[in-house]
Image: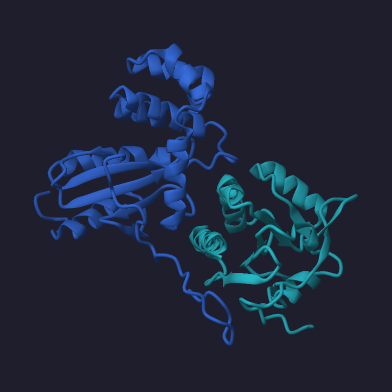
Chain colours: A blue, B cyan
Amino acid sequence: VTATTAGTATTPLQGLGGRLAIPVNDQDHILGPAQAPVTLLEYGDYQCPYCGAVHPVVQEILRRRPEQVRFVYRHFPIANVHPYAEPAAEAAEAADRRQRFWPMHDWLFDHQDRLHPAYLRLGAEEVGLPAEVVDREVGSHAYLDRVQRDFIGGIRSGVNGTPAFYINGLRHDGGHTLAELLAAVDTAAGRDTAEGE
Amino acid sequence: MSQGNKMPAPGERAPGFTLPLSEQRRMSLDEFRGRPVILVFYPADWSPVCSEQMALYQGMVPEFERHEAQLIGISVDSVWSHRAFAESRGINYPLLSDFEPKGEVSRLYGSYSETTGTAQRTLFLLDRDGVVAWSHRADPQERNPGGEGVLAALEVLSTERVAR
């Protein structure tokens, strides 16, 4: 990627070329064994239909490769296009505060047609959270900074749409079907896809 | 002037311009002197890549504001197209219309394609004095350049200012 035309000064700011800018850390939402050889990281938006479509794919990968893969989810709500994405992410953070991030995460992706704030309460209740409190925390944007930190970190990593996947810190530019993602994960783990099927 | 491809280089003064923001209002680059300005030239309202790119930048507005920077989009589309496009994508930052004479400002910034008759996908960061600090031409043109480059350049600009 050329930053300027020929004959002009070259700028040193070329970006990271598809590398994860913010390493996985203890602020992250992590599922799976810490020693797993492969880290699959997703920047996602709860109202994005493509993210909703890939959610069961990610679950299937984790089911098939329980020892090999740990999964990390980071927020990347495109709030102006998806008005419910940010409150949904904030609700997931409210759930995280109460050790219920993953159930809320699953509920959100399983109910993408129910992300209106009125329904969010229902989701909170269904995953065993105090709906009133979650409602209040989302309403006062108690976790908005946390969500925006993820978003900006995503920008720094070159995320330009969702879902965006990184496998062991490198951008996955391939497709998002089970076969494609599983093959990419297995390649990163240094093992053939066919093995053990 | 028909030489469309020489982008103003870092260190050069950014060419001044005044373009329609709406039927009634014209906007000048001069209005933003004293603040960093991010100019985004893009081929067309409604095209898939532009839609994604311009919506993404709306999401970055709070971060740009932290740096007191003003974001401005420019294409050859009409003010009416801009208005409908902005509404459909939730875009609040100004989209200027380089419509008549067509592409005049895009040409000034080496960002006009004679082949397609549209602006090319380029980005410029101007410092508070209106001097080009950083620029980028998307390569390939159909690729959304995202926000990492401009954000990194903006941070360098802010750091240099603090250091001075």
Q: Residue at x 73, y 84 (%)?
A: B3
Can you see residue B55? no
Q: Residue at x 12, y 44 (%)?
A: A67
**Drawn side of residue B98 relative to residue B45, left or right:** right
- Total tally of numbered discs in the picture: 0
Q: Along the line of sight, which residue is nearer the eye, A38 or A14?
A: A14
**Drawn side of residue A112 relative to residue B21, left or right:** left
Q: Position of residue A92 (x, y in %)?
A: 39, 29
Q: Residue at x 69, y 49 (%)?
A: B93
Q: Position of residue A156 (x, y in %)?
A: 44, 56
Q: Along the line of sight, which residue is nearer the eye, A83 or A23?
A: A23
Q: Position of residue B101 (x, y in %)?
A: 86, 70
Answer above or below: position of B111 versus A89.
Answer: below
Q: Residue at x 81, y 57 (%)?
A: B78
Q: Along the line of sight, which residue is nearer the eye, A141 or B144?
A: A141
Direction right: furthest residue: B24
Direction front: furthest residue: B164
Answer above or below: position of B92 versus B14.
Answer: above
Q: Position of residue A101 (x, y in %)?
A: 32, 28
**Drawn side of residue A140 relative to residue B131, left or right:** left
Q: Along the line of sight, which residue is nearer the eye, A57 or B118?
A: B118
Can you see residue A188? yes
